Amino acid sequence: MMRRMITPAILQDQIDYYRARAAEYDEWWFRGGRYDRGAELNARWHADTAAVDAALVGWLGERRPRNVLELACGTGLFTRHLAPHTEHVTAVDASSEVLAINRARVGGGNVEYIEADLFTWQPQRRYDAVFFSFWLSHVPPDRFDAFWAMVGQALVPGGAAYLIDSAFDRTSTAKDHVLPGRNEGIVTRRLNDGREFRIVKMFYDPKPLTARLRQIGWSATLDRTANYFIHGSLEPHTAVAL
Ligand SMILES: C[S@@+](CC[C@H](N)C(=O)[O-])C[C@H]1O[C@@H](n2cnc3c(N)ncnc32)[C@H](O)[C@@H]1O
């Protein structure tokens, strides 16, 4: 299937979708409601979520970043792991609705929240680490290089990024979501009330993503969990001037 054109209207739909989904967002992670796939698949899912949670906490323990920039922080499923392991987290997202949930879940004093569109936002300082989960897959391919340039600009010399994202598996999403071909680029997402939105969804495998990143100056050490996720750390070959 040919990849469809990703227009500004789809990027706005993507923001609108996550704003409208905020209160039901966590059902995906905890396999509630339409994301409940039955005991066997749920157990596989939970094994993989535990694996990426542990991998991130392990990475934070090894690197000990004092400050972390979290891009597209959402409701705080990962902010809750970042905040206890660092002195300061700057958490950015376009949705005031998810930021409110994140703040209620995590905001214990060392998390600063910024409401901003990541396709225009630029970091105002540098960080020891940049983290983003389930965000790279929402970055259109023609914005891929600019996105990684922004991540590079956000890092101190010697800093590193960590990403977690979706591997292609049709049972990862809600039962009533159709996951088209892995390279289509645009998928339709539905809320519990039936409203539909179009969003960007790119699926990456560790090996080709590592090769692609190498071309633009990043060393990646990426892994895949048993079924559902890719994850790992990334370091720029050279620091980028602000
Ligand atoms: C799949 S969720 C990931 C949230 C969180 N990182 C997690 O792992 O649960 C994608 C997030 O991107 C945010 N988002 C969508 N478009 C955005 C944009 N243009 N700028 C900033 N955030 C955006 C949404 O509000 C949503 O919180």
Image: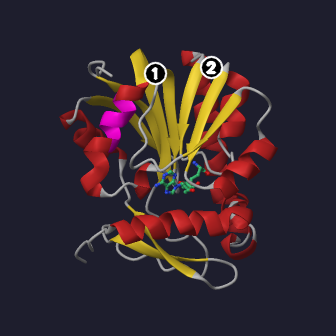
Total tally of numbered discs in the picture: 2
- Closer to viewer: mark 1 or mark 2: 1
Q: Amino acid at mark 2?
A: Gly
Q: Position of residue 38 (x, y in %)?
A: 72, 72
Magenta segment, prevailing SS (helix, strand or loop): helix
Q: Amino acid at mark 1?
A: Arg
Closer to the N terminus: mark 1 or mark 2?
2
| Residue drawn at (25%, 71%) of the image | 3
Q: Is residue 216 magenta?
A: no
Could you say which quadrant of the image residue 2 lies in? bottom left
Q: Position of residue 64 (x, y in %)?
A: 59, 16
Could you say which quadrant of the image residue 198 lies in? bottom left
Secondary element under disc 1, as helix, strand or loop, is: loop
Q: Nearer the viewer, residue 236 or 11?
A: 11
Q: Position of residue 119 (x, y in %)?
A: 39, 50
Q: Magenta residues?
A: 147-152
